[in-house]
């Protein structure tokens, strides 16, 4: 078994779906697994010139490989059916490729109704938090209890560890490390764990880990109730240039400079060895570059790139700077 993991290093919306899709083009992966979150995720993917937004379904379906909604996720069956219909109408063949771990927990109508009343945290109101709560309270409903899901159910252990060929697995994460309930700015966090440790709880052998792909924007964004964006009008320009509106809720994303201290902490705590900075084109359009912690302004794109190469932790052996919504 060989395992690569894609995680976000900020507050979500870093471009994890794009990177996962790009890595899958290599053809080396036998499986793709979504390892956390639910329909609160929104991964934007351009496949053969067409834009798709996935919420539950792993990016492996675009390449015809087994794509598992892992046991670390929670699943809204109605939303899954909608997503399946959209992908099928877009020419994506889901037959025999889409799989659901039998021990995934279900987001019920009651969970969505409860979450819709939240006004404090600024959740996506998708029912994820109540579903995870019931999972750990041992009162939840599992995928194995849902008739519609029975054709898609899979025992993850059997799928990965009793295979005739060595599995090469790409783990696709949702949200970002600084939304993790243990490490984020609590209570302004998500309801699932977002780091490498969460991926390993989805049935893969920790000794199989090869690469951890850490994904960040060259600036920061955040969606929620807390104040995140400074009053400087440059961040309004970044917001517009970057089309910073949530893929799931459509809410405006607050913007700020890259927080270098948090970035390096996330890299070290997750053992990131491949680092990607997305949306270089946005700051190029705005013609402003900066970071926080420490607070530094740069006169050019080349200057910030050179600085970041010199200060990221030594565990990172490759750094990529991307200016395309489709490619790395």
Image: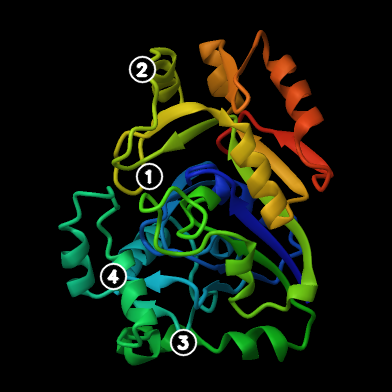
Disc 4 secondary structure class: helix
Image coordinates for residue 305, horizontal then vertical, percent: 73, 23
Closer to viewer: mark 1 or mark 4: 4
Residue identified by numbered label 1 = 247
Q: Are marks 1 and 2 in contact (CB under 8 Å)?
A: no
Dot 1 crowding, Cα within 10 Å, few <14, some 14–19, many 20+: some
Please tell me whether residue 171 is drawn above or below residue 48 in the rendered image.
Answer: below
**For mark 4, what is the residue?**
130
Mark sitting earlier along the chain (1/2): 2
The C terminus is located in which quarter?
top right
Indicate the secondary structure of the residue bearing disc 3: loop
**Which numbered tag is attached to residue 102?**
3
**Closest to the observer: 158 or 184?**
184
Q: In 3D space, how far apart are the residues under numbered discs 2 and 3 (Cα atoms)?
A: 48 Å
Marks 1 and 2, how far apart at CA? 24 Å
- Would you identify the image quadrant in which residue 298 lies? top right
Q: CA distance from mark 1 to mark 4?
A: 22 Å
Where is residue 304? Give x, y as percent. 70, 20
Q: What crowding class fits label 2: few (fewer than 14 Cα within 10 Å), some (14-19), or many (20 or more)? A: few
Q: Can I make out residue 327 in this image?
A: no
- Frontmost of labels 3 and 4 is 4
SS type, badge 1: loop
How far, Cα to Cα, is label 1 from label 3? Answer: 28 Å
List the residue tagged with mark 2: 231
């Amino acid at each position: 078994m060989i395992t690569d993991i894609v995680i976000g290093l900020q507050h979500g919306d870093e471009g994890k779906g794009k990177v996962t899709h790009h890595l899958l083009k290599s053809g080396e992966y036998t499986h793709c697994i979504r390892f956390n979150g639910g329909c609160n995720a929104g991964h934007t993917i351009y496949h053969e010139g067409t834009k798709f937004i996935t919420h539950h379904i792993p990016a492996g379906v675009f390449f015809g490989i087994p794509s598992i909604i892992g046991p670390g996720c929670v699943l809204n069956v109605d939303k899954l059916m909608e997503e399946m219909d959209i992908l099928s109408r877009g020419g994506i063949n889901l037959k025999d490729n889409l799989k659901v771990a039998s021990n995934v927990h279900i987001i019920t109508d009651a969970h969505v109704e409860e979450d819709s009343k939240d006004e404090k945290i600024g959740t996506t109101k998708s029912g994820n938090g109540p579903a995870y709560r019931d999972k750990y309270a041992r009162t939840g409903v599992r995928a194995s209890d849902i008739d519609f899901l029975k054709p898609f159910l899979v025992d993850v252990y059997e799928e990965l560890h009793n295979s005739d060929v060595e599995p090469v697995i790409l783990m696709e994460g949702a949200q970002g490390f600084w939304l993790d309930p243990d490490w984020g700015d609590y209570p302004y966090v998500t309801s699932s764990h977002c780091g490498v440790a969460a991926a390993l709880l989805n049935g893969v052998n920790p000794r199989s880990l090869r690469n951890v792909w850490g994904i960040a924007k060259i600036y920061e964004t955040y969606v929620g109730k807390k104040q995140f964006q400074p009053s400087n009008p440059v961040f309004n320009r970044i917001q517009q240039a970057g089309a910073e509106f949530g893929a799931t809720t459509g809410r405006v994303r607050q913007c700020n400079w890259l927080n270098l201290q948090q970035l390096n902490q996330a890299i070290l705590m997750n053992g990131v060895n491949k680092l990607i900075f997305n949306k270089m084109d946005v700051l190029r359009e705005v013609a402003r570059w900066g970071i926080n912690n420490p607070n530094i302004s740069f006169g050019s794109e080349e200057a910030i790139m050179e600085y970041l190469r010199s200060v990221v932790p030594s565990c990172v052996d490759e750094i990529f700077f991307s200016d395309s919504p489709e490619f790395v």
